[in-house]
Image (cartoon, rainbow, N blue to C red):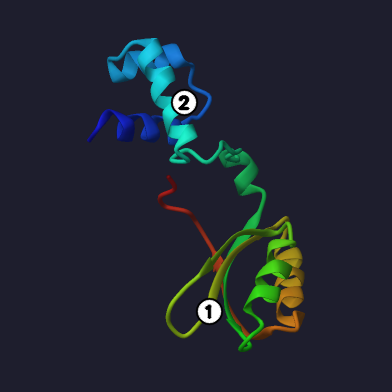
Amino acid sequence: MSKDEELLSLLAENARLPIAELARRLNLSRTTVQARIERLERTKVIAGYTLRRGALAEKAVVKGHVLITVKPKSAARTIAELSAMHQVRTLHSVSGEFDLIATVAAESVEALDRVIDAIVELDGVERTQTSVILATKVER
């Protein structure tokens, strides 16, 4: 694994690690690590930094995968409407029987049901299939 890949892995685990700690773990100088991060940001390999919720916060939400079939010629509008819903954590276009897969999160099963109902009511949505996430076994 290259030093850049190692650096990206460390940042993916904890983007708040100090440069000095990253340098120590990579066996590089602080200046070298800082230069690598700046280059990776400049070349858009690192597009940004984000918040990752802790285990306790994630236990307080109910999540599900919603598989969505979109009416022909409605994809752009439907994607925009789904993107505007704060309960939609991720949205993927996929091949196969469905067009999109959304990961949604809500504070209760009842709230998750309301989110799914709202998705079904979108004009461009033909049908959905939902699986409630019981546990996350691996998350990187």
Q: Residue at x 74, y 77 (%)?
A: 117
> How many dots with numbers?
2
Q: Nearer the viewer, residue 111 or 129?
A: 129
Among all residues in the image, which is located at the extreme left? Answer: 1
The quadrant where residue 9 appears: top left
In what element is the residue under mark 2? helix
Q: Position of residue 2 (x, y in %)?
A: 24, 33
Q: Position of residue 3 (x, y in %)?
A: 28, 28
Q: Which mark is residue 38?
A: 2
Q: Residue at x 43, y 40 (%)?
A: 45
Circle 2 crowding by C-alpha within 10 Å: few under 14, some 14–19, many from 20: few
Q: Position of residue 85 (x, y in %)?
A: 74, 62
**Where does label 1 land, which residue?**
99
Disc 2 residue type? Glu
Residue 33 is left or right of residue 75, and the answer is left
In what element is the residue under mark 1? loop
Q: For the C terminus, give its image quadrant.
A: top left
Residue 132 is left or right of residue 84, and the answer is left
Q: Position of residue 76 (x, y in %)?
A: 65, 74
Q: For the N terminus, give its image quadrant.
A: top left
Disc 1 residue type? Asp
Nearest to viewer (mark 2 / mark 1): 2
Q: Which mark is residue 70?
A: none
Tell me whether circle 2 and circle 1 mark residues in contact (CB < 8 Å).
no
Circle 1 crowding by C-alpha within 10 Å: few under 14, some 14–19, many from 20: some
Residue 53 is left or right of residue 43, and the answer is right
Q: CA distance from mark 2 to mark 1?
A: 37 Å
Q: Residue at x 66, y 53 (%)?
A: 61
The quadrant where residue 71 appears: bottom right
Q: Residue at x 45, y 16 (%)?
A: 19
